[in-house]
């Protein structure tokens, strides 16, 4: 009951307090963009002496490394508790914090799957000229345990990358232009993440209707992309101005139509379910009539999972192919069953027997 109340909501609160209220094993995926602890000592200036709006917010300041490490262990411990056994977590950071975070991730028993480099196409220049330009951030992707059967939509990522395997270096721009939230010309959030980054993460490691948490929601990018991609979300944000901006942004976000949310990976990796299994499991009974989409053709289901149409009998695929005069036909989408006042493809029944799509 509590879990359903959390779905598709964001709250204004302290993550360390709010995470403790969440039941064990609630989320399929967690994306965390915690404070980086940048420890900036001086103002940054451009060559023309104008000031750079860097990350100097109060929420990013910690007394020392010890206090930051304690904070990290606290929120990561809660995240592990509320992550499902086959769930995964993504944490993003810079050189200021990601190595400390990575150590905590391993100490808590997470199993690191990849470190991913987000190579920024348009990074902020190094105005002082005293070191290399910081042109990337690092993401750590980890499963809850070493043996977790986590979701990885390999085919989807390959398709997204023009049929090439997706590598662990991602060339994506920083958030700017119309996507960047501003109030009277000033950035609402100093480290707003681009939707393209979250789109790739969520597409890679979750499925439609999965439940996603962002414990440091910020400007709301995780929730926005989750909503667009047909995932459920829950976000926590401590700063009221960020929370209000995220809330407004969410209200203006439209969901992608359900028929476009299926992915190549989802179809290819699901385990095979024979038509006969539907009969064995009582999802459809022998003697039931099934139809083509226009209900002009009808066949009857036999006890062994074969079907009969006039003088033809055989599998749902073989009989459909014979009717169409084709070499082959996908019977799952050709045949429909009566459900109330509407016809539904028998493939809908097959989906009930399939577990969540996971990388085995």
Image (spheres, rainbow, N blue to C red):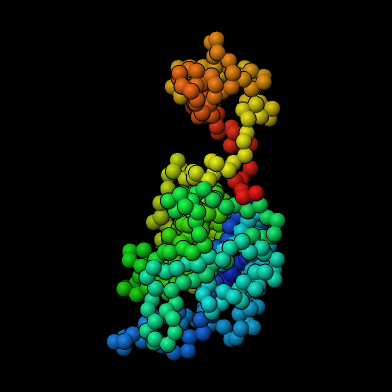
Residue that sits furthest to the top in the current view: 311
Left-right relation of 344 to 148: left
From the viewer's perspective, is residue 95 above or below residue 221? below
- Residue 106, image x, y percentages: 67, 69
**Residue at the left extreme of this rendering:** 48
Task: Say if residue 176 shows up in the picture.
Answer: yes
- Nearer the observer, 75 or 12: 75
Q: Is residue 155 above or below residue 273?
A: below
**Quarter of the figure with residue 19:** bottom right
Please indicate whether residue 241 sits to the left or right of residue 144 in the image.
left
Q: Position of residue 128 (x, y in %)?
A: 39, 87
Whole-percent x, y for residue 326 in the image: 46, 22
User: Which residue does the image show at 59% across and 52% down from the upper left?
Assistant: 151
Q: Residue at x 47, y 67 (%)?
A: 118
Question: In the image, is residue 297 above or below residue 206?
Answer: above
Nearer-the-camera pick, 88 or 1: 88
- Residue 243 visible within the image: no
Q: Is residue 86 above or below residue 245?
A: above
Q: List x then y, in percent, for residue 86.
A: 66, 54
Which quarter of the figure has residue 313?
top right
């Amino acid at each position: 009951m509590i879990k359903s109340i959390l779905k598709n909501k964001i709250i204004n609160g302290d993550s360390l307090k709010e995470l403790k209220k969440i039941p064990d094993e609630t989320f399929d995926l967690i994306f965390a963009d915690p404070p980086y602890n940048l420890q900036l000592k001086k103002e940054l200036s451009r060559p023309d002496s104008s000031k750079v709006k860097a990350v100097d917010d109060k929420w990013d300041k910690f007394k020392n490394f010890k206090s930051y490490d304690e904070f990290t262990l606290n929120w990561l411990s809660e995240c592990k508790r509320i992550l499902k056994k086959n769930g995964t977590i993504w944490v993003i950071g810079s050189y200021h914090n990601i190595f400390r975070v990575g150590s905590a991730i391993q100490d808590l028993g997470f199993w690191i799957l990849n470190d991913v480099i987000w190579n920024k196409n348009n990074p902020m220049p190094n105005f002082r000229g005293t070191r290399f330009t910081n042109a990337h951030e690092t993401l750590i992707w980890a499963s809850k345990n070493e043996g977790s059967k986590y979701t990885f939509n390999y085919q989807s990522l390959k398709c997204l990358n023009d049929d090439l395997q997706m590598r662990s270096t991602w060339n994506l721009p920083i958030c700017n232009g119309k996507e960047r939230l501003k109030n009277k010309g000033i950035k609402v959030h100093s480290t707003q993440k681009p939707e393209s980054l979250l789109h790739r993460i969520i597409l890679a490691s979750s499925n439609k209707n999965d439940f996603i948490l962002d414990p440091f929601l910020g400007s709301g990018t995780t929730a926005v992309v989750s909503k667009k991609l047909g995932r459920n979300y829950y976000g926590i944000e401590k700063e009221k101005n960020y929370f209000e901006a995220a809330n407004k942004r969410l209200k203006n976000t439209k969901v992608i139509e359900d028929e476009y949310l299926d992915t190549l990976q989802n179809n290819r990796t699901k385990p095979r379910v024979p038509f006969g299994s539907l009969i064995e499991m009582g999802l459809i009974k022998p003697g039931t009539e099934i139809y083509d989409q226009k209900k002009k053709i009808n066949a009857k289901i036999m006890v062994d999972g074969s079907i009969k149409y006039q003088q033809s009998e055989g599998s749902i695929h073989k009989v459909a192919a014979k009717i169409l005069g084709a070499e082959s036909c996908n019977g799952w989408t050709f045949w429909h069953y009566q459900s109330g006042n509407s016809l539904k493809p028998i493939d809908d029944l097959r989906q009930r027997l399939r577990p969540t799509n996971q990388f085995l």
